[in-house]
Amino acid sequence: MKKNILTIVIMAASIINLILSAVLIFSVMPTMNKTSNLIDKVSSVIDLEIESQSKEDELTPIQDMDNITVTYEKNVNINLQKDAGDDTNHYAVISGIVVSLDKEADGYSDVKKLMETSTVYVEDIVKETISSFTASTITQPGIKEEAIKRLQERYDTKCIVDISLPGYLVS
């Protein structure tokens, strides 16, 4: 009698183990596969961004750079977007803009002439870029990166390599 009860307990434990294994295979494994695929995709995107940044972020030697300077008689206040729940008006202050061009890049002379004759586009793009940030999200590197992208698109060139904002201050 004891052998039969022991056999029944072992058989019940084996059946429960089989059922739990089936549940594990059919419910948990697909979710784990989806998560694994998502992690693979994210890591591949990060690798692509690192590779593309390393090629673009090659520093231009200072001797190959030329600066175009826009200075203001008085500091310019630029209103920032409001954060959710924040009623305070925040603004950024700049006293000028310095755009650095790569002398060795294609189209350098054309872009330099265009920028020197009409700095209004440079001023507008930088002001629009700054005003698109909020007081909590604004950073000088973020402004530079976005403004450089927009200027490169506007002038259809890669010779614009840096922007400096003299007198930059956020209040």
Image: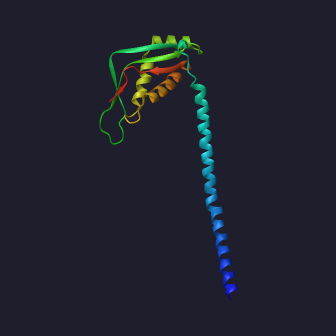
Against 138, is 20 above or below?
below
The residue closer to the viewer here, 106 or 19, is 19
Residue for point 63% across, 45% down = 40
In the rendered image, residue 45, in percent from the top left (x then y), is placed at 60, 38
In the rendered image, residue 111, in percent from the top left (x then y), is placed at 53, 14
Quadrant containing the N terminus in the rendered view: bottom right
The residue closer to the viewer here, 112 or 66, is 66
Residue for point 55% across, 16% down = 61
Residue for point 59% across, 28% down = 54
In the rendered image, residue 41, in percent from the top left (x then y), is placed at 62, 43
The residue closer to the viewer here, 108 or 140, is 140
Against 82, is 65 above or below?
above
Q: Residue furthest bottom?
A: 1
Q: Quadrant of residue 134?
A: top left
Q: Is residue 96 left or right of residue 157?
A: left
Against 119, is 132 above or below?
below
Q: Is residue 133 left or right of residue 30?
A: left
Q: Residue furthest front?
A: 2
